[in-house]
Amino acid sequence: MATLRSLTCISSECRSFYELRRRIQLLLLLLLAVNMVGGQIRYSIPEEMKKGSAIGNVAQDLGLDLKRLRSGRARIVTGENVHYTELQKDKGILVVNERIDREQLCGDVTPCSFSFELILENPMELHPITIEVLDVNDHSPIFKKANIMLDISESANLGARFVLDSAEDPDVGVNGLQNYVLTSNDNFVLKQHVNPDGSKYAEMVLQRQLDREKVPHISLELIAIDGGNPQRSGTVNIDINVLDVNDNAPVFKQSVYKATVIENAAKGTNIVTVNATDADSGSNGYVTYSISNVKSNIADLLSIDQFSGSLFVSGLIDFEKDKKYELRIDAKDQGGLTDSSKVIIEVTDVNDNDPIISIMSFTSPVSEDSPPGTTIGIINVKDLDSGDNGQVNCRIEQNAPFKIKSNLRNYYTLVTDTVLDRESVSEYNITVVATDAGIPPLSTKRTFHLKVSDVNDNSPVFSQSVYSAFITENNSPGVSLLTVGAKDPDENQNARISYILENTNIGGAPVSEYVSVNAESGVVHAVRSFDYEQIKQLFFVVKAQDGGSPPLSNNVTVKLIVQDQNDNPPQVLYPVQTGGSLVAEMVPRSADVGYLVTKVVAVDVDSGQNAWLSYKLQKATDRALFESGLTEWRNQNYPPSH
């Protein structure tokens, strides 16, 4: 943990160095003990630790193993610009990430601490962590001025008080300002006082009458000492001019003035007017006003008119920095006599801070099959104002299938409200609006761009319920018959379609011996040449299958019609001719004209016009003796009658 700085005892009443160091080490060890109540832990460390110095074993103190830190995407959430600490997830150790200056962080506020949360997901856990920063003596008391000029009348009464400028020491506790010492002199002793806020100031009290004629000028030194080890100190010179006879000091009408001022008040705004009177006359009764012992954070914000006593705004009043100011006003006459009064100013808050939206986590894309209630983002919303001005409400601006809910203070979860469909809407712009309860209210918007990832929830769909194609017989193998096409509304691999020929038999032979289909293009090709006289049409099924896992598919029926060609000559069935011999028919000599000599019957296995037959005499010894019927027959199953 943090190392203890070496300590040096400067007081004769201190114990030995080693005994003192042992006691302080024991005290620090007790302060460094972990405080865990209900998942909360607290560490104490000295300021100015080196970057990378270990603060504590968060995993061990929270009872978490390292696997949980990694799986829960453990991280520190501060909501601030400066990240003082860093979580080493591989070791579960919290270390210093940036220089921690207690004075810069907290000023004079004690104890000084800062808090943040350790957040884990799946399930979501929130562990508040508080780091208390212990002071080390790294500052000396400092006076704002190198010299204090005092004009004191020689007639000043014994016991007259003269408030001296205070020193400032940014350190706190024992390291802060502890004591004032005034150099030895015959006229004044030093009295020390404590303000209500714990700061110390000193007064010089006159214990021996001044004599301007003997000693017109007195030079002293005021030393401010802190309680650190080793001690640090600061010095201011006090130059006193002894004036002649002014026996009445100014007197304030009130010992305490109370007032309020609204933050962001314009420069020059009057806050309160103080008033002191002096019973003397002439220049000895003329009173001027000044702010004394003012802290540096107030000096730039408030000023006083030295003649009227009007206290007014001279800088930017910010409620979020200081909610109350306490200061002392000195009234001083021309003879150097003074009185002082306290002024307490309460700062009133106005709604001048917009809500701050911080993204803790956001998941994109989200799968379209995610169930309602799926967390897609975690945000932190803060408002630096107080009261109603700091109360924030979050909502989603547009009508979208999402909702926002709050489970922890200042944390909101963005979840899906319905089932998503990528094919309907593939991406969303989700605008979260944070609005405070001030009058008028202030708002902040933050837009999240969410993409919806695809799942394979759509089957391919063919453009037709049945495909038909024609092919003329005696085709060349490999000729393209038709193209089947399907579409899939999914995307990427889920929409990549492959075409597959379903395995069926045609006439006892696999369909693959007749046709094939290109797996990518869906083009159907003839595998062989078709013969109309053997097969006139065939039906087969093509399947479209996507590339999802598991894949989805759809089928379509393809009808292929074979068209006839005139590729078969007629065949004479009657009279039967064998061996090339001639057929002899007997005709009576007395036969009349029109006598039926014989019938010729022929068939053609083609169809349609290709099967229409006509008859004519090819050769005849005497064409005038015989003739054939000219009837054309379209159906070879029925022979002609003549």
Image (cartoon, rainbow, N blue to C red):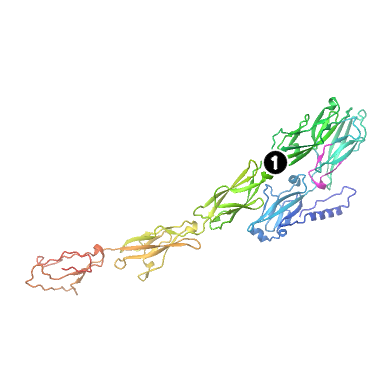
* 221 vs 451: above or below: above
Q: What segment is highlighted magenta in the picture? A: 164-181
User: Closer to the camera, 15 or 117?
Assistant: 117
The quadrant where residue 586 appears: bottom left
Left or right for 122, reference 21? left
Secondary structure under tag 1 reads loop
Left or right for 176, reference 434? right
Q: Is residue 166 covered in magenta? A: yes
The residue under the point 80% across, 55% down is: 30
Quadrant for the N terminus in the image: bottom right
User: Closer to the camera, 69 or 291?
Assistant: 291
Query: Residue beneath label 1, please?
Result: 349
Q: Which percent across, then down, holds residue 246?
A: 88, 28
* 418 vs 584: above or below: above
Residue farthest top in this picture: 282
The residue under the point 17% across, 74% down is: 581
Q: Which percent across, then down, holds residue 460?
A: 45, 59
